[in-house]
Each structure stands twice: as C-alpha cells, then as structure tokens.
Amino acid sequence: MVLIGLECKDRAGPVIIVGIIGMLLYQVFENIGAFLGLMPLTGITLPFISYGGTSLLINMACIGLVMSIKLYGQEEEDELLLGEQRPSLPERLLQLLKREKTTV
C-alpha cells in the first residue's frame, strides 16, 4: 500500500492511503499492546483475523478503495502514454445510442 501511495499522481490518493495504513496499524499495535499487557483490552478487532462483521466489512472496503486508487492512477497514466483521452460519459452514451439505432 505504501508503494501505491508513492506512485500516485494526484494529491488525494496518498492522503487516503496514509489514513487507511494508519487505521490498520493502530488496530495491530493496539492488539499487540493488549496481548503484552501494556494497554487495556478495548475490544478492537485484529484486521482480517478477529471475528467482527462490521470491522471486516470496513477493512475490506478500505482495501478496495486502495485498489481503486491504484487502478484509477494506472488508467490516467495509460491515457497520458497513448495521447488519447477517453470520451466523457455523455459522449459514450451518445455513441451507444447511435450503435443501437443502427442495429435496430
């Protein structure tokens, strides 16, 4: 995840990724501290290991967000390399409508 954050071209991607990494590391260190008796037991789940439905759902959503940031950055980079820009959403919809009219 750190490499994905370093390779991001925009400003928002690394900030989001640093927040997600911080969230996961806090949970890990809180659990390690509780196991060693240095911190009180608080009920924070260990990411992807402890049973907790909402916690697991949020952790998976965060990893999906990081993957989306990575894919979006690659897509933008591919457009820059090819020198082409993808058509906007309205343009793509018009192209699809034209194709449907010609096939009907």
Image (spheres, helix red, strand yellow):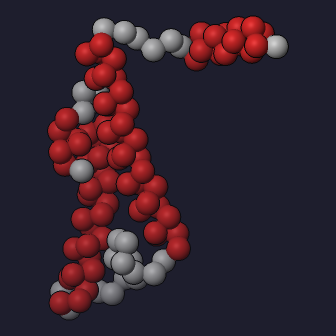
| Pick the front one: 42 or 88 | 88
Q: Residue 71: where, in percent of width, then height? A: 36, 36
Residue sitting at x 18%, y 45%: 3
Q: Is residue 93 left or right of residue 76?
A: right
Q: Is residue 87 left or right of residue 23?
A: right
Q: Residue 23: where, in percent of width, then height? A: 31, 60
| Pick the front one: 64 or 11 | 64
Residue sitting at x 46%, y 69%: 55
Q: Is residue 7 left or right of residue 11?
A: left
- Indicate whether 38 appears above or below 68: below
Q: Is residue 53 visible?
A: yes
Which quadrant of the rendered structure holds the C terminus?
top right
Residue sitting at x 22%, y 74%: 29
Q: Is residue 90 visible?
A: no
* Residue that lies at the very extreme toward the front in this rendered image: 103
| Pick the front one: 93 or 14 | 93
